[in-house]
Image (cartoon, rainbow, N blue to C red):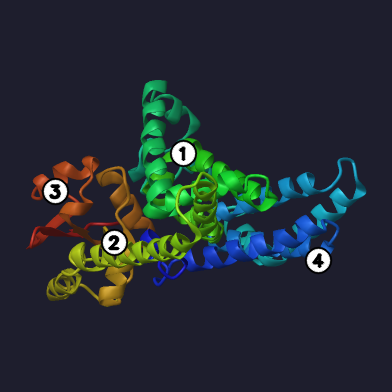
Amino acid sequence: MAIFSVYNAPFVGVTDNFSLFMLFGGLYFLVATQLIEDPTRIRNWFLLGLLAGLMTLSRSDGLLWLALTFLFVLWRLPRFSSRILHSAFFVSLGFLLIMAPWYARNLSVYGSLMAPGGSRALWLANYDQTFVYPPTVPTKESFLALGWDHIIADRMWALSNNLQSGFAAHGGIILFPFIIAGIIYYRKDERVRLAGIAWLILFFVMTFAFPFAGARGAFFHAGAALQPMWWALAPLGLEEILLSLRKRGIGNDQNRPIFRSALVMVAIMLTVYVVYLRIFTLGWGEGEDANYPVVEQFLLDNGMKDTDIVIVRNAPGYYLATGRSAISIPYGGEEPILAAANQFDAGYLVLEPAGVLAPIQDLFQNPEGHDKFIYLGELDGTQIYKLEIE
């Protein structure tokens, strides 16, 4: 199940944190197994704190696993027991051993333990505001000014997308009914309960607190930590279904290997199809950024220096393709673009059709006649400007 992981398969081999989260999640439940047997093992509480720290260092939403671990402490130990504080201390110690250097870095850069942008994401009006400039624009007041109809509609959209992600990505499509069966049959197992609570917390946070990030991939990413549990439950669920049918006189023991093999074979075929679709049919990593080297040569021909910085839709992609420093196009219109250009000393704007959001439609449709946007030309639909910055 882990090797042929259907929707997860294209992602586990790329420079992302899917594999890390799956590894840490699997280790988390292995350690939790020992704590279920003996909750007084301080070393294991310390290990859970370490794993929660590693998950937080991998993804900001990994912090939820620290909260889950504290909940697990209260769950496993008698109430009002001195062991609760003792265990919670070692969880915190393990967590801080990993995260303290990063928090010290944040204090030196931002003056706070956490980067300030995280809490502002609560007040986004749409996904594109993730790149808003200045970053102080989204506020509680601007969020409430949207109106409750708009706010609720956004969360219903996220709810629909996250349910689909739960079925296709976390559930592996064909594995989904067997995972559900495994959860039902093993619902009294505390590891299964812990995984269920973790999934529900993630689902709630990524649907109602951070709907835009959640629906655009964060819920899928964050759920990777639970995949080892689902992969373990899928064959167990199949076994329990077959056993239940056998008790009702349906099927026989000779059919069980056939169904087991069929489940694996279907998972393999779906995985091959999804990987082919993602990489070859959809052209993952190709197409939209393929003209960046041509754009770079055009800019060089128009007098750009080696130290100049470019504003572009996909800044990391531009750097990989050309070796030139770049920043992403900020959301908000022409003024934020110029403000960002002044702050980061960026002298050129590369405007692709895919990166033209509503606030800069006028610039794209009427490239001439803008005082501080000097139109240099167009390459296959991509418009290039020199910026007049202070």
The Cα atoms of the two marked residues, 3 and 4, are separated by 60 Å
The Cα atoms of the two marked residues, 4 and 2, are separated by 45 Å
> As rendered, which of 125 and 48 lies closer to the eye?
48
Mark 3 vs mark 2: which is more N-terminal? 2
Nearest to viewer (mark 3 / mark 1): 1
Residue 382 rendering spot, x and y as whole percentages: 13, 59
Tag 3 secondary structure: helix
Q: Which amino acid does label 1 sit on?
A: Thr
Which residue is labeled 2 in the image?
Answer: 314
> Residue pushed farthest front?
249
Residue 309 rendering spot, x and y as whole percentages: 30, 67
Which residue is labeled 4 in the image?
Answer: 43
Q: Is residue 325 above or below residue 222?
A: below
Identified at 74% across, 63% down, the residue is 94
Identified at 29% across, 51% down, the residue is 338
Which residue is labeled 1 in the image?
Answer: 207
Mark 3 vs mark 4: which is more N-terminal? 4
Tag 1 secondary structure: helix
Judge left or right: residue 110 versus residue 173.
right
Mark 3 vs mark 1: which is more N-terminal? 1
Task: Residue 320: tell me if it is visible.
Answer: yes
Which residue is labeled 3 in the image?
Answer: 364
Residue 320 rendering spot, x and y as whole percentages: 30, 74
Q: In this view, does 115 lie above or below 258?
A: above
Looking at the rendering, which quadrant does residue 33 occupy?
bottom right
